[in-house]
Amino acid sequence: MLVWGIFITVILIFLALDLGIFNKNPHIISTKEATIWTSVWVIISFLFSGVIYWLYSTSLIQNIDQLSPINATLKYITGYLIELSLSVDNIFVIAVIFTSFKIPLKYQHRVLFWGILGAIIFRAIMIFFGVLLINKFSITTYIFGAFLIFTAYRMLVSKDENFHPKKSFVYRQIRKFIPITSHMNGEHFFIKIRHIKAATPLFIALIIIEFTDILFALDSIPAILAITSDPFLVFTSNIFAILGLRSMYFFLSIMLAKFHYLKYSLIAILTFVGVKLILAHHYKFPEWLSLSVIAISLLTGIIVSIRSLKENEPIEP
């Protein structure tokens, strides 16, 4: 529990520094700043794999599955890449939500900050119950595996539909219980109008982002549980991917629309981890194979998308 406590404390310190020092004053996140922070979080995430190796080579962490240090490290990296890749769709939806509620660029970071904090709490709860179910009921792996394959199939056959936040179930329910205003007063989530406390678009965007993240977690949590049921590996890989998502949003929200073939990378990853879960009690996939399939799927989607963009570029006379 000591290691858990130290990890959570360090994450909270990072978040406090982020909001209290680095982003104390609302400002528009430039591409350069977003690139730097994205790089920082990716580097920290991969450096933490060294911490994982050290922890699992000692008795400082409870090694439930009796993993070797190298296997634990590979599982952490694989889980991190899965969560990072499945966050791509989340970035699209966040961009649509901000556009729909006309959230100024300089206040988007504040909404994402509290959104990430909420996501960490909800993910922790979902991971706890997911690990509990898999360890207690063997049939859970078949259910999770079938769900992931079904999700991959839906992604393959479904047409791209526009998401309308103001028509969503969550937005309609919020309006029933909380007065809503279209006016904003700086970075405040609530303002007083004629002695009535009303929620600003910032708060509405935050709530919808939180519920959207929970829906996306229904895919990502079972996907990571296909790699390992070790709660520390699942939690840490998930948290580092979520922390990097915020800066990735400002870095990739515009460019991601051009990476059309990443969708097929996600379909391949979901299908693979779904099959891995279904066969979990019959065949153990080598860790290097899982990591290779996920990395190759992502790289293939990116490379094919870039080549497609170059081929479709208009030729200047």
Image (cartoon, grey):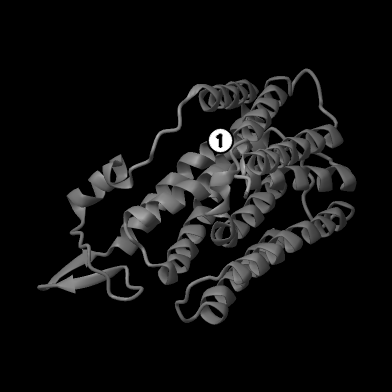
Q: Is residue 15 above or below residue 248?
A: below
**Which residue lies at the image location 52% right of the left edge and 50% below the top edge?**
91
Count of all numbered marks drawn on residues in the image: 1
Badge 1 amino acid:
Asp
When asked about the image quadrant of residue 135, the answer is top right
**Which residue lies at the image location 63% right of the left edge and 45% below the top edge?**
315
Residue of label 1: 219
Q: Is residue 218 above or below residue 196?
A: above
Residue 311 image point, x, y percent? 67, 39
Question: In the depicted view, which residue is nearer to us: 16 or 29?
Answer: 29
Label 1 secondary element: helix
Residue 269 image point, x, y percent? 68, 32
Question: In the depicted view, which residue is nearer to us: 71 or 107?
Answer: 107
**Which residue lies at the image location 62% right of the left edge and 49% below the top edge?**
317
Image check: 194 left or right of 299?
left
Residue 300 image point, x, y percent? 74, 37
When asked about the image quadrant of residue 279, the answer is top right
Hey, which residue is sitting farthest left in the picture?
A: 194
Quadrant assignment for the N terminus: bottom right
